[in-house]
Amino acid sequence: MILDVDPGIDDAMALCMALFDSRLEVTAITAVGGNVSPQSATRNVQAIIEQLDPPRWPRLGIASEPEEGLPVDGRHLHGIDGLGGANFQVAELRTPHPSEKIICDQVRAAPEEVTIIALGPLTNVARAFQRDPELPSLVGQVVMMGGTIAGPGNITPAAEFNVYCDPASARAVFRSHCTKTLIPLDVTNRVELSYDLFNQLPDETTKVGRFLRKILPPAFRAYRQEFGVEGIHVHDSVTLMAAIYPDLFTTEEMAGDVETSGELTAGATIFDRRRVPAW
């Protein structure tokens, strides 16, 4: 499993789940710009791994700037550094490799066995597919958090954040021939982490508990100030659960695409839901 992330507090939660699940083999974590800049995303991936110190350290991929730059970020919800202002210190990477190279290497090493969990913009996945045109047929599957089916967006009325950050890359992945599953806002918005559940997390005597209890309280405050609610959405944890426990979810096959240039609809995900689809 490769986790492609733009940490982000909800990405960090998903990493906590994945890295300590004995059933999962997380071979790589690749950083991508989204909630924070590419540089901050790379730093945050390092910080999370160093703070959690999992039994097996995955390979790390560094993020690079998307072609058009990032139109927005998520610091209003995730803090100035993306991790609630925790300001973790990190060691310098000795041999940094671009995320897209790490993805290509891992998939080539285990053809048809690797699942890519894409929890941020699809910049890295699209670049990996461009770098190695055979890669889409060699990936086991791509599970993506992004887009909407019938509901509104969360960054514009039409668009979800991850897709809006890099719609051209999202379109490239949508149009690729890999096996893919989209976990849209229509699903992830149904799940909320309440403060009661927060209090049931591991305590501060554990590395995971200490880490989560440091980064989550600022997210609760941000959601209260921004939306007037007492819980937080955990989009990325829901997406990871869909990959681990597919039987808990109902899937439907659809043809979809991404709007890349609309004045009001850039980043919107469009699906052919007509009675007789033509796509």
Image (cartoon, rainbow, N blue to C red):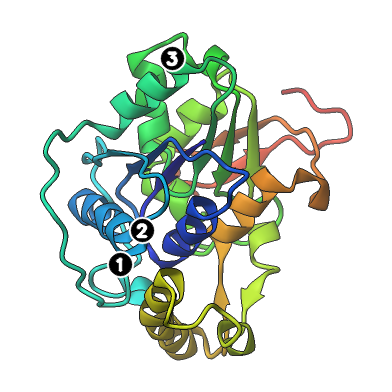
Give yes or no for contact between labels 2 and 1 (Cβ–Cβ under 8 Å).
yes
- The image quadrant of residue 150 is bottom right
Type of amino acid at the residue the image marks with label 3: Arg
From the top left corner, tell me how far across and down residue 160 is, in percent. Answer: 51, 55
Q: Is label 2 in a helix, a strand or a loop?
A: loop
Q: Earlier in the sequence, mark 2 or mark 1?
A: 2
Q: What residue appears at the point 67 percent right and 69 percent down from the top-left corner?
A: 191
Residue in front for this viewpoint, 64 or 216: 216
Q: Identify whether 174 is placed above or below 265.
A: above
Mark 1, mark 3: which one is toward the viewer? 3
Q: Which mark is drawn over residue 7?
A: 2
From the top left corner, tell me how far across and down residue 140 is, in percent. Answer: 60, 23
- The image quadrant of residue 168 is top left
Q: Earlier in the sequence, mark 2 or mark 3?
A: 2
- Which residue is denoted by mark 3 in the rendering? 108
Q: Which mark is drawn over residue 82?
A: 1
Which quadrant is home to the C terminus? top right
Q: Identify whether 14 is placed above or below 103.
A: below
From the top left corner, tell me how far across and down residue 182 is, in percent. Answer: 63, 42
Q: What residue appears at the point 40 percent right and 54 percent down from the top-left corner?
A: 54
Left or right: 147 in relation to 53: right
Q: Is label 3 in a helix, a strand or a loop?
A: helix
- The image quadrant of residue 231 is bottom right
Q: What residue appears at the point 32 percent right and 45 percent down from the top-left corner?
A: 32
